[in-house]
Structure formats: C-alpha cells, structure tokens
Image (cartoon, rainbow, N blue to C red):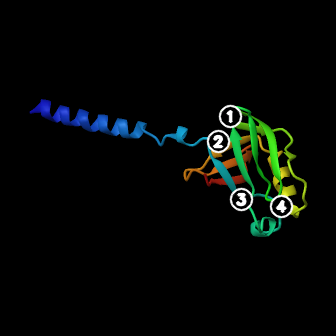
Amino acid sequence: MNYKVCFAMLALYLGIFISCSTTKNKGAYTLYGHTWELDYISGPRIAFEGLFPDQKPQITFDRTTQRAVGTDSCNGYSAPFKSKRNHLSFSDPYPTTMRYCGEGEKQFISMMQKVNAYSFSPDGKLNLKLDDVTILRFKKIL
C-alpha cells in the first residue's frame, strides 16, 4: 500500500514539475516573416488617429538583408537594423518616396531612431522600446 501512495505522490509531483516548467513558446514570436502595423506611439500630444488618419505605419523585418521596410503612413522607407537577443537598433531610415502627409510620419521616424530594444507582449504584439519603455507597439497583420 505504501508503494501505491509513494507512486501516486511521485506522479503528482512529476505532473506539477512538468507543467510548471512548460512555458509558452516565446520562439513563436519573431520579428521575421510578418508584417506589423503600428497601434501605439508614445509622446505626441495629437491623438493616434489624428497622426495617422488614412494609413498606419507598417514594418517588415528581412533577416537576410538586415533591413526593415515599410511605410511611415505616407511614404515608403527602408532602414538597416541590428538585432541581437532583445536589443534592436535602426540606422537612419530613408524614404523611398517623398510626399508630405503631416506630422505622423515625422513622429514615427523620430521614434524609430530612438529604439534600442524590443519585446513581445503576451498577446503577441511587438513592442519597440527605448530602454524599458515601449515607444512603438505593433500588431501582426500578415
């Protein structure tokens, strides 16, 4: 009888140990292979929808070329980036088109140049950060 109790206790402890050591696969969250759309920007006193009334900025990271490409809500851009662990930095983004579309694009590009880290929120959103503070947040759209 003691063997049955010991075996049951061992099975219970192993079950608890295995379930506690299993965490959500953070590797499922990756910069690459997705298009991300901005849904938050810190700083500006203008409402988010006012900054980006027609189109929200988007970004796609290319691992092979180490370039981020997308739109700043108006113009296309391309920016070399460096990524190691949770650190991320962009070289100066340069536009691929040159129209003026308001203050949103300037705010977005300015914030991109401040980024030095990234993380993923539990719901899979991409947080681009200045140190520990999220300054740009993106949702995956593709």
Query: Is the residue under label 1 in contact with that under label 2 (CB below 8 Å)?
Result: yes
What residue is shown at x 90% (from left), y 54% (from top)? 98
Q: CA distance from mark 4 to mark 2?
A: 23 Å
According to the picture, the residue beneath numbered tag 1 turns out to be: 63
The residue at which mark 2 appears reads as 31
Q: Secondary structure at mark 2?
A: loop
Residue highlighted by disc 3: 40
Q: Which residue is mark 4?
A: 104
> Which numbered disc flags the more N-terminal residue, 4 or 2?
2
Which secondary structure, mark 1? Answer: loop
Left or right of residue 104, residue 27 in this image: left
Q: Residue at horizontal 19%, vertical 36%?
A: 8
Q: Amino acid at mark 2?
A: Leu
Give the quarter of the figure containing the N terminus.
Answer: top left
- In the displayed structure, 51 sits above or below 79; it is below
Residue 85, image x, y percentages: 66, 33
